[in-house]
Amino acid sequence: MTTAAGDATLSSSEKVRRILKAGRERLGVSFGFLSEVDDGTCTVVAADGDPDGVTPGTSAPLESTFCRQTVRTRGVR
């Protein structure tokens, strides 16, 4: 992940794609995504892998997102 982030020859979108890929491979999951939260809405900015309908531009209320559910059930570690 550090290598991709520091590579000045890569575009920002390619850096994000490579970081998402490395993260999902490390965690052993089929997809990963980067999202932004604004005014209670979570919007997917980038996705990598087999996202099962989670694509850039997809948005949902923050209360119904994976991240919110994870924090509620497992806490932040």
Image: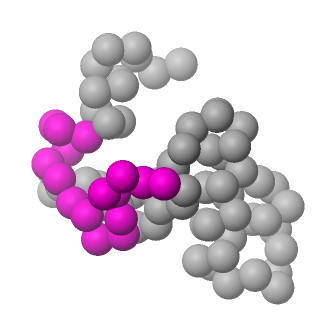
Between 17 and 31, the one nearer to me in the picture:
31
- Residue drawn 29% across the image and 71% down it: 57
Is 51 contained in the magenta span? Answer: yes
- Name which residue lies at 32% across and 36% down: 66
Residue 65 in the image: state x and y as whole percent: 25, 40
- Colour scheme of this structure image? one colour
Q: Main secondary structure of the magenta part?
A: loop
Q: How many marks?
A: 0
Vertical order, 74 against 39 (above or below): above
Q: Is residue 61 above or below residue 12?
A: above
Left or right: where does residue 51 sit relative to residue 10? left
The part of the chain drawn in magenta is 50-65
Q: Is residue 61 magenta?
A: yes
Q: Foreground: 30 or 39?
A: 30
The percent coordinates of residue 64 (x first, y second) are 17, 38
Whether residue 38 sits left or right of residue 66 in the image: it is left
Tell me what residue is drawn at x 20 percent, y 44 percent: 62
Residue 29 image offset from top left, x and y in percent: 57, 38
Q: Is residue 38 visible?
A: no
Quarter of the image for residue 53 reads bottom left
**Residue under the point 68% across and 84% down:** 11
